[in-house]
Amino acid sequence: MRYNRSLGANATLPTGGRGGGGGAGRRSQNTNQGLRQSFNLNYNWSRSASDNVNIFPQLGGKSQSDSNSAQVGYTIGYHRITSIFNVNWNRSQSQATNFFTSGTDIATQLGILGPGGVALNSSPLNYGLPGISMSTISGLSQAQPNFSVSQTLSASEVLSWVKGKHNLRFGGDYRRVHRDFLGGSNATGSFTFTGLFTEDAAGDQTSGSPIADFLLGLPQSSSIDSSIAKSYLRDNVFDGYAQDDWRAKSSLTLNLGLRWEFFAPYTEKYDHLAFVSTNPDQGFTSETEISAGGAGLPGALVYPYRRAFAPRVGFAWRVPKFKEMTVRGSYGMNFTVGQYSGFATSMAHQPPFANEQTNEEANASGKGSSACAQSSTPTCFTLADGFPAPDKVGNYAVDPHYQLPYVQVWNLDVQKTLRWGIVVNLGYNGSKGSDLDIRTAPRATPSSPNTDPGNLIFTYEQAGAYSRFNAATVRVNKRMSGGVSLGANYQYGHSIDDAGSVGGGGSVVSQNWQDLGAEEGNSSFDIRHQVSGTYAYELPFGKDKRWITTGAASHFLEGFSISGTYKFATGSPLTPSYQAAVVDVARGTAGTLRPDRVPGTSITAGGGSLREWFNTAAYAAPAGLYGTAPRNSITGPGTVSNSMALSKTLQMGDTRSWEFRATASNVFNTVQYAGVNTSDGTPNFGQVTSAGQMRAFQFTTRFRF
């Protein structure tokens, strides 16, 4: 719902938005008018609901969300100065439940109990079945309950001033963020079976059977991270910017800007945040649980980053003596702040504010051991007694002086307009990410025996990784003329990094905490070759066309058009790993151990088929503690995409029209391989496991007035 009201004889509708520091735009035709005022109101509401389907129906669930937003804006201008002020409010409420939430305590019914034989989860909101993970086959996972309310109140101001050849813009905004939630990714608990208890006498890790361990009821590890009470996170965000769109010459325009942002780390309304305080400089030889405000740290447990200054420069140059040739270039910086949300979520799920347990069958040196089953009185964790007591020290640590990750981007583009409305662009794009996120799991090794003296299973998050991206592009487009328009784009690019995640919170734990350089590899989004484009053809029938310009046939055939898009690309890279190896689970990093790369053996030899997408003989079990195979060393299935649409538009006067459109995605019904199993040791290692969507039709009609 929207309402706009212009005030005064020279009023114009508002044309600005929140202070984002975006493009300055061209000078308004109204800059020389007198006083101009306008007022606007907006309100939006939406609701969505869906079923979370599982191959086992009882493990599925439902989700729903409601969103509300309101905006009030006031614009006032006088001659060449314009001020735009906005106040925005957004609130969204979402919940995900399984079929046991607030109903049947299925874990207790099955005899899966918590400390002292009581219910595993005291809150009915966290009821559900613990997940099952196995090293060689797919496990079982219950839809996790999650309840959240997010609210943001913001105020922004944009002031523009046209002075001579300069179009100056100044702005800023303030946002107050509330994020309340209950739940998590492991609220119902989980067990991991690796075959540890059915290994042969020599302890060969490949000889055990995780299914046999499951039938014995003997997991190697169990974990749970269940909220005891609701968390109330709070955050303040400030930013400001200045920008000048300068028409330096008739053929040269410069765009200069500087932006500053301050993102305060989240605090909790009742100081219910905690993390593991450790000493990375001394090799992680101590671990202590600290709550908000403890040990001289701030309430957020992470110091704010106050130096997020981001310059931006751009130019557009119309080359003299070269008709219709333009050169454009730009440079800019951007900071990412998604980590702060991840920090607070993890710290809100630490003891004593959550039922957090990470239990491991391990010997004194932290290695997986089945000794508990070999004594006269077995003391192993079982399905019935897998969660003996909540941990007093958590499983998450972060650098209190975490520096915000940032990325620098630059580009250069040369555009030339040729005959017949053909436009050719040659471009280069580059970026460099710095201080990107890294997660490690420090554990004792032969070279560092004093690390983690308490055998605590925890991860440590810090900034320090990098990324590099370079791409060359060629774009050729023919503007609509004679009823035909065409477009084709080609890009060759390459991206590498050693980060757990690029552009967001790190979710992938490094394989070896002592050798972060070994994490360098192709980025997860590295696609070397991409060809894409569009086409449109208006049939030459009807009034003002070439053929059949009058009569009934003209009215029937006019307004038909055929259009489509296409994309062909090489695949995204994939990483070979072990789903739940014994040594990996013992380190608390299931899924990060990689196999060894067999020297001299091609990864692609004999590959490319449904049964063998890549050469599995190129990988072998690690000879040492860690595998030598690089991250993202396997090229996944590429993309072959063609979509087409047939539409007809009926003109019903000067201002009304009725459109009918039939759209076919994957119009040629091409089988598109999607998933590939890269878990070494599983029966279908190296095989294609899923395919993309086959041909689908969509029919729409639209009336314009």
Image (tube, rainbow, N blue to C red):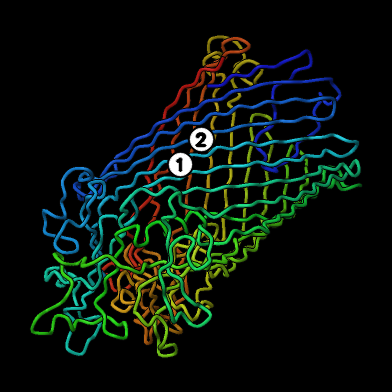
Q: Identify which residue is drawn at 18% across, 47% down.
A: 58
Asked if residue 11 is positioned above or below residue 445 in the image, the reply reads: above
Relative to 612, is 7 on the left or the right?
A: right
Q: Give the residue number, with chain letter if any, for mark 1.
A: 150
Residue 505 rendering spot, x and y as whole percentages: 49, 59
Q: If the image is split into quadrants, where does the C terminus sit?
A: top right
Quarter-of-image position of residue 628: bottom left
Task: Give the camera-side residue of 264 and 42.
Answer: 264
Amino acid carrying mark 2 in the image: Asn
Residue 117 position, x and y percent, is 13, 62
Q: In this view, does 29 lie above or below 636?
A: above
Q: Can residue 526 be seen in this view?
A: no
Q: In which quarter of the image is residue 441?
A: bottom left
Look at 63% across and 52% down and name the residue there: 262
Left or right position of 263 against 501: right
- Asked if residue 98 lies left or right of residue 549, the reply is left
Q: Mark 2 points at which residue?
A: 90
**Nearer-N-terminus badge (1/2):** 2
Q: How crowded is mark 2: few (under 14 residues within 10 Å), some or many (20 or more)?
A: some
Nearest the eye: 13 or 266: 266
Residue under the point 42% across and 83% down:
451
The disc labelled 1 sits on which kind of residue?
Answer: Ser
Secondary structure found at label 1: strand
Residue 435: horizontal and vertical position, in percent? 60, 66
User: Are the residues tagged 1 and 2 within 8 Å (C-beta)?
Assistant: yes
